[in-house]
Image (cartoon, grey):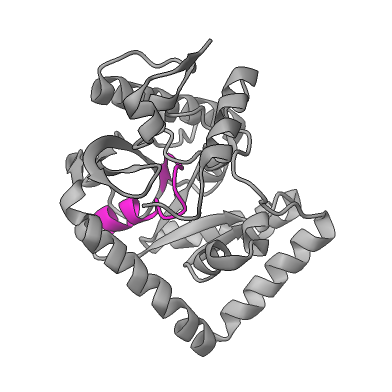
């Protein structure tokens, strides 16, 4: 699933971030940066857009059809392990996912649709609402729960919305790694915000780790196609006897450790953060010659 053109600069950004020890830093190019005023306007504009249900229906249909087509095209390349963990969820939940592709939401979408026959909802930061071009169109026409890094907005709008949705049996996808690192195989530390929201909304968290294995089939000049294994991991629950802050720390660390264990089992090696081009799934430079930077 290659979205966009040449990925060389993005991969070099990943390399730089790893050398600097900044595992949650932005790697993509030209992502928008918004002032507080612009962020507020972006969210207001999105909510206004969603109120026009007919227009949203017309604009979003091609996105959902495209996701169905992409899922269908990749179905033979997708394997799922850990269905028994998803079966433990009785209502709704927050789904956490490693973030490696603009279309990586097809994986939680695939498992939730297959198990519960329901759609998913994506949490999107306000900067995503200002993206332009094809990626902007994709994001804007998802089932979004917009997130603005404003305490007032989070407490009065975001968390109550999440709580209602989970109680109704809805599934919400959040990326605790925050930034997209294209085709990066390794799990990265989880930022606590996701689990603070989960504790405040009294919502279980279901971690998902996507394993990516190279195939012999070309995708484009830079990449080969991939086989994917969706590892559904053990659900994590907030503890009512602990504060939201305590829960966020405990849950974030548990999620991360579950991903680390899944990574090490899937790839047969211990996790480290030394850079290698082979850690970029499907990248021909990594397949032909593994180059390490210590």
Which one is nearer the viewer's eye here, 281 or 161? 281
| Relative height, residue 57 to residue 98 (above, below) | below
Q: Is residue 114 left or right of residue 207?
A: left
Please say whether residue 104 is one of the residues in the magenta stretch: yes
- Residue 247 seen anywhere in this rendered image of the structure: yes
Q: Residue furthest bottom?
A: 54
Which residue reaches farthest top? 294
Closer to us: 90 or 98: 98
Q: Position of residue 106 (x, y in %)?
A: 34, 56
Residue at figure coordinates x 51%, y 43% from the top left: 7
Q: Is residue 182 left or right of residue 231?
A: right
| Residue 183 % position (x, y) | 42, 39
Instruction: Examine the structure image and report whether residue 274 is included in the region drawn in magenta.
Output: no
Q: Which residue sits at x=35%, y=13%?
A: 270
Q: Does 280 sit above or below residue 173?
A: above
Judge from the rendering whether residue 91 lies leftward or rightward of residue 33; answer left or right. left
Q: Nearer the viewer, residue 214 or 247?
A: 214
Locate residue 65 relative to residue 18 in the image: left or right: left
Residue 52 image point, x, y percent:
57, 86
Residue at 18%, 44% (x, y): give it.
Answer: 79
Return the x and y of residue 49 as percentages of the image width and height.
62, 79
Residue 242 in sight from this viewpoint? no
Q: Residue at image x 62%, y 57%?
A: 128
**Quick check: 213 above or below 52?**
above
Q: Which residues are magenta?
A: 95-113
Count of labels in the image: 0
């Amino acid at each position: 699933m290659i979205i966009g053109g040449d990925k060389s600069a993005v991969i070099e950004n990943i390399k730089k971030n790893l050398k600097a020890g900044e595992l949650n830093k932005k790697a993509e190019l030209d992502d928008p940066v918004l002032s507080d005023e612009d962020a507020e306007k972006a969210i207001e504009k999105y909510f206004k857009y969603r109120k026009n249900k007919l227009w949203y229906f017309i604009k979003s249909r091609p996105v959902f059809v495209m996701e169905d087509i992409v899922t269908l095209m990749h179905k033979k390349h997708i394997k799922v392990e850990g269905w028994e963990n998803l079966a433990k969820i009785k209502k709704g939940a927050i789904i956490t996912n490693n973030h490696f592709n603009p279309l990586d939401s097809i994986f939680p979408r695939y498992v939730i649709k297959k198990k519960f026959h329901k759609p998913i909802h994506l949490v999107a930061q306000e900067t995503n609402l200002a993206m332009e071009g094809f990626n902007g169109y994709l994001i804007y026409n998802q089932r979004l729960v917009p997130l603005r890094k404003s305490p007032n907005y989070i407490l009065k709008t975001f968390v109550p919305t999440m709580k209602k949705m989970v109680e109704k049996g809805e599934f919400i996808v959040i990326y605790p790694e925050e930034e997209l690192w294209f085709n990066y195989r390794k799990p990265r530390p989880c930022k606590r915000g996701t689990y603070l929201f989960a504790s405040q909304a009294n919502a279980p968290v279901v971690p998902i780790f996507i394993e990516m294995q190279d195939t012999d089939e070309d995708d484009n000049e830079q990449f080969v196609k991939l086989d994917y294994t969706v590892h559904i991991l053990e659900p994590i629950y907030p503890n009512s006897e602990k504060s939201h802050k305590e829960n966020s720390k405990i849950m974030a660390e548990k999620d991360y450790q579950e991903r680390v264990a899944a990574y090490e089992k899937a790839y047969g090696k211990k996790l480290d953060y030394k850079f290698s081009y082979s850690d970029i799934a499907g990248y021909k430079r990594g397949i032909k010659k593994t180059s390490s930077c210590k």
